[in-house]
Image (cartoon, grey):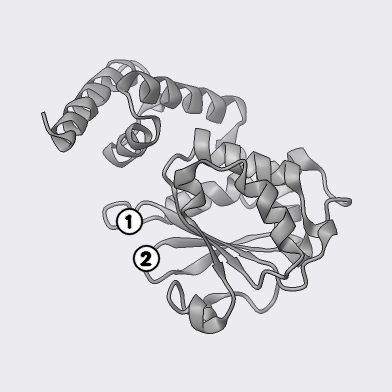
Amino acid sequence: MTTQANFEQNFKELKNRLKLISDADPDQYHNDHSLTRYLKAFKTVDAAFQAILKTNKWKKEYNVAALTEEHPNVKNNLALKKARVLRHRDMQGRSVIYIPAKNHSVNDREIDELTQFIVYCLEEASKKSFEDVIDNFCIVFDLKNFSLTCMDYPLIKNIIWLLSRHYPERLGVCLIYNAPTVFSGCWAIIKGWLDENTASKVTFVNSEEDLCQYLIPDILPTDM
């Protein structure tokens, strides 16, 4: 059996297995695009199925549905301009999460509140995806005016955990823009936490000309 044929067989098995529980509980439902992402990320039917159940349980317990623009933590961090899901897309049609590092200080944040805000951003970017065309998104970390107080390792660990466990295969590309020399030491640490597949999606962009390969610079906010 070819690799493609094997994947298709596994996909069919995963879909049938999930249908048994989603028929009884519609909240357990995942569409074909989501099933494909979980199967790609977790490799086997059993692992993908268990991961989906864990995500469904986490979304309910974390009350992800309540994380809207009106949620106090979301509203506060939007006002502080910690991150934004942009109106425009990148060159591939991906939704874009823009994170200006200069607006963040590790000494002036509440990690659980900020993680809730990141979940809101991941959810918004996912909802904006044209899944029939491209079902992953672009994250831009803008490191202009970056200093070491902006570097928040616990938050980065949370983002990595969220992407790998509950938003698998959603990251299409992560652009590190305007990185100063001092960030090279930070990156050496962060890279050690990433699997090979995720690390390959991280790209350092050092000029507006290079940025144009991924998105039109004009879509980046000037008010953050």
Which is nearer the eye, 96 or 173? 173
Asked if the residue under mark 1 is in contact with the one under mark 2, i.e. CB atoms within 8 Å, the reply is: yes
Say which label, 2 or 1, has the lower sequence index: 2
Asked whether, in this view, residue 36 is left or right of residue 75, the answer is left
Q: Name the residue under label 2.
A: 93
Q: Is residue 165 above or below residue 71?
A: above
Residue at 25%, 26% (x, y): give it. Answer: 15
Kind of residue sitting beneath label 1? Ile
Is residue 3 rendered to the left or right of residue 93?
left
Residue 37 visible, this angle: yes
Query: Of 195 and 5, which appears nearest the observer?
Result: 195
Badge count: 2
Residue drawn at x 45%, y 56% is: 137
Judging by the rendered image, the residue that carries numbered circle 1 is: 134
Distance CA(mark 2)–CA(mark 1): 7 Å
Disc 2 secondary structure class: loop
